[in-house]
């Protein structure tokens, strides 16, 4: 039992290694076999049935002719059966017996011999016309046999007709043999055609596979050609092209990310290196060394922030950070963030205002919520105009806590808005008023909003200002 199971298991496993061309050819060939066998069966059945019915009608007519001849009175000196004997062919034998008087009225010469032979052999050579032709050969002879009793002139006549159909059945048998040979030839032709047709059908797949294999990281911009393809293969082609687009975008992001992170790290490292080299060139006072160390410490803090932010983004993408959602007073939190940034905003005469009802509460991670608002306020102050305004708005809708941070700053070009959440993305150098800007702030904000299963959207008009819209689900997060 184990060997049988192992055998079928091996067959099942090996099926997946069989060429698709072979599979298609095999099933096409099997289909042809079924169709041809069915056609032959139906055709032979029809021919046999038609042949049997024809012979039955012929024999019935012979019996009717015998009855008709019995009634003939035109030639009283000549037996009507003798007339029949000369009128029918040599392949027809018949017997007319008067059952009432128990005597044979007429019998074809040789009839007894045939009947005796057939009865001795249990009628193996007889083929009944009431049934489908079932050829049984003995001594190369085939017969149709019909017997019938009729009442004629107050006499019961027993009539037997024996028809030698050897030639016709031989022709029929020969026809069936030829039909089988032709069917075999057709099957062989179908097998050859099935392989050829399968290769034609699969040729688009081979072209697609060849093109796919030619695409590497060097030519990710290429796509699978839009030549004529079957609908099913077009789905595969389109799906693969979509994968290529995502891969190309990912490679570009990785390449840009590598360049940006190298630039971001290079700047503080070069600053550290330069300050240390300057400090070592000449002797300095203690206070000068202290100032240099403070500057170096600031650059170290900058490096630490870059590493921490990248680590946070990486962990959030892998879902390795679990938020601690709790019910907080949104109005109070916004006021706290306003108080925290009022001092920085006053340097540019920027007014920060809060529009929020006092009884608004929601379930969010308090620390992450503060970081989100902090990042948005920092950007709003950095890119705002002198004497500008910043508005913090919060309200509850049916399913969400809605937060809006709007400013009257310099705005963002429309073409740059879709890329604002990309890591290290910067619009232009003229916007970087601070060398501390790393281009990670909005990436962090989006990541933290996504961790709350929320959404974030930015709308901006260059020269007029920017608005950030955030939605947090009202329901507590599991």
Image (cartoon, rainbow, N blue to C red):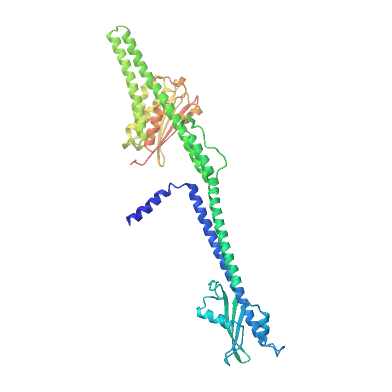
Q: Please state the horizontal and vertical placement of residue 318, each as a whole percent of the image.
A: 36, 35
Report the front residue among 93 and 351: 93
Q: Quadrant of residue 367?
A: top left
| Residue at left offset 52%, top offset 44% | 233
Q: Quadrant of residue 272?
A: top left
Report the front residue among 22 and 96: 96
Report the front residue among 380 and 287: 287
| Residue at left offset 50%, top offset 47% | 21
| Residue at left offset 41%, top offset 24% | 260
Find the residue positioned furthest to the top: 283
Q: Please state the horizontal and vertical placement of residue 153, each as a whole percent of the image.
A: 63, 91
Residue 223 shown left or right of residue 378 in the figure: right
Quadrant for the C terminus in the image: top left
Q: Is residue 60 above or below residue 274?
A: below
Quadrant for the N terminus in the image: bottom left
Q: Quadrant of residue 181?
A: bottom right
Q: Is residue 292 above or below residue 167?
A: above
């Amino acid at each position: 039992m184990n060997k049988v199971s192992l055998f079928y298991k091996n067959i099942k496993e090996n099926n997946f290694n069989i060429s698709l061309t072979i599979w298609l050819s095999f099933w096409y060939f099997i289909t042809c076999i079924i169709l041809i066998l069915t056609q032959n069966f139906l055709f032979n059945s029809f021919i046999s049935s038609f042949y049997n019915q024809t012979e039955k009608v012929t024999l019935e007519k012979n019996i009717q002719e015998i009855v008709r001849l019995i009634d003939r009175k035109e030639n009283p000196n000549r037996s009507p059966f003798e007339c029949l004997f000369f009128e029918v062919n040599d392949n027809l034998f018949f017997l007319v017996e008067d059952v009432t008087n128990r005597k044979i009225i007429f019998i074809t010469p040789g009839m007894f011999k045939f009947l005796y032979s057939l009865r001795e052999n249990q009628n193996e050579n007889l083929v009944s016309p009431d049934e489908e032709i079932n050829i049984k050969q003995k001594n190369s002879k085939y017969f149709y046999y019909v017997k019938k009793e009729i009442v004629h002139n107050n006499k019961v006549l027993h009539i037997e007709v024996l028809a030698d159909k050897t030639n016709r059945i031989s022709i029929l048998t020969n026809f069936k043999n030829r039909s089988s040979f032709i069917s075999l030839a057709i099957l062989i032709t179908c097998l050859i055609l099935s392989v050829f047709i399968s290769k034609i059908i699969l040729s688009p797949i081979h072209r697609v596979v060849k093109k796919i294999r030619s695409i590497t990281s060097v030519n990710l911009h290429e796509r699978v050609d839009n030549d004529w393809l079957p609908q099913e293969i077009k789905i595969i082609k389109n799906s693969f092209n979509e994968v290529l687009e995502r891969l190309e975008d990912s490679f570009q992001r990785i390449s840009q990310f590598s360049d940006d992170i190298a630039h971001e790290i290079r700047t503080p490292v070069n600053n550290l290196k330069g300050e240390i080299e300057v400090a070592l060139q000449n002797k300095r006072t203690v206070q000068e060394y202290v100032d240099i160390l403070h500057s170096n410490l600031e650059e170290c803090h900058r490096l630490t922030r870059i590493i921490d932010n990248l680590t946070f983004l990486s962990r959030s993408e892998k879902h390795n950070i679990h938020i601690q959602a709790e019910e907080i007073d949104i109005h109070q939190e916004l006021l706290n963030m306003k108080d925290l940034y009022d001092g920085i905003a006053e340097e540019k005469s920027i007014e920060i205002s809060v529009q929020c009802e006092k009884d608004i509460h929601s379930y969010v991670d308090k620390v992450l919520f503060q970081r989100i608002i902090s990042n948005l306020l920092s950007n709003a102050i950095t890119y705002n105009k002198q004497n500008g305004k910043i508005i913090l708005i919060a309200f509850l809708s049916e399913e969400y806590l809605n937060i809006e941070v709007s400013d009257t700053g310099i705005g963002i070009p429309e073409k740059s808005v879709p890329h604002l959440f990309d890591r290290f993305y910067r619009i232009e150098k003229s916007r970087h008023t601070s060398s501390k800007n790393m281009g990670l702030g909005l990436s962090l904000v989006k990541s933290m909003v996504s961790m709350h299963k929320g959404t974030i959207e930015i709308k901006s008009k260059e020269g007029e200002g920017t608005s950030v819209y955030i939605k947090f689900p009202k329901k507590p997060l599991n």
